[in-house]
Amino acid sequence: MDQENCPYCHVHEDTEQQIVLENETCYFIQKESEQLVLEGSGLIIPKKHKRDVFELSEQEWKDSGELLQKAKDLLDKRYLPDGYSVGWNTGRAGGQSIFHAHLHVIPRFNDEPFAGRGIRYWIKQKDNLRK
């Protein structure tokens, strides 16, 4: 996927995508339709197109970590989750389907249908719901 067609390079153009937090190099975004699967879930993405996590600059790493903590603080207050699934999918074999680095931040709840299952299970279920 090239930058021209990359949805994360054009977050301002997606009316459903909301930039919740940002810093110098990264955004924490949430998409309304994603909230139907697990409430509060979102992504931390670099503002510049980087194919995967291994292309991040030192500053993007630092800023991703800063946004992760800020997102957790916000989600803790808003949703009171019982835990989190946090992760990068890298490469097609690693489950990456959009080739712009993105860190999944998914609040988890004891009473949700995927409780006790990791991020890969959630992603597989989400893909099955789209079919």
Image: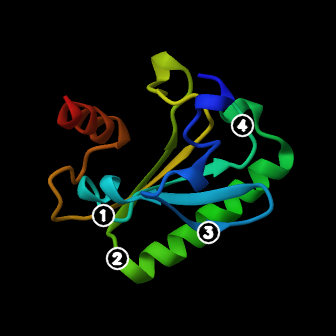
The residue beneath circle 3 is 21
Which residue lies at the image location 28% right of the left edge and 57% below the top edge?
A: 38
Give the mark toward the camera: 2 or 4: 4
The residue beneath circle 1 is 39
Q: Secondary structure at mark 3?
A: strand
Which residue lies at the image location 29% right of the left edge and 42% below the top edge?
A: 122
Disc assigned to residue 49: 4
Q: Place residue 78 in its image quadrant.
A: bottom left
Q: Quadrant of the N terminus?
A: top right
Q: Earlier in the sequence, mark 2 or mark 4?
A: 4
The residue beneath circle 2 is 79
Q: Residues within 10 Å of mark 3 (few under 14, many from 20)?
A: some
Q: Secondary structure at mark 4?
A: loop
Which residue lies at the image location 59% right of the left edge and 43% below the top edge?
A: 8
Q: Earlier in the sequence, mark 2 or mark 3?
A: 3
How far apart are labels 4 and 3 at the CA level? 18 Å
Q: Residues within 10 Å of mark 2 (few under 14, many from 20)?
A: few
Q: Earlier in the sequence, mark 3 or mark 1?
A: 3
Q: Place residue 32 in its image quadrant.
A: bottom left
Q: Amino acid at mark 2?
A: Tyr
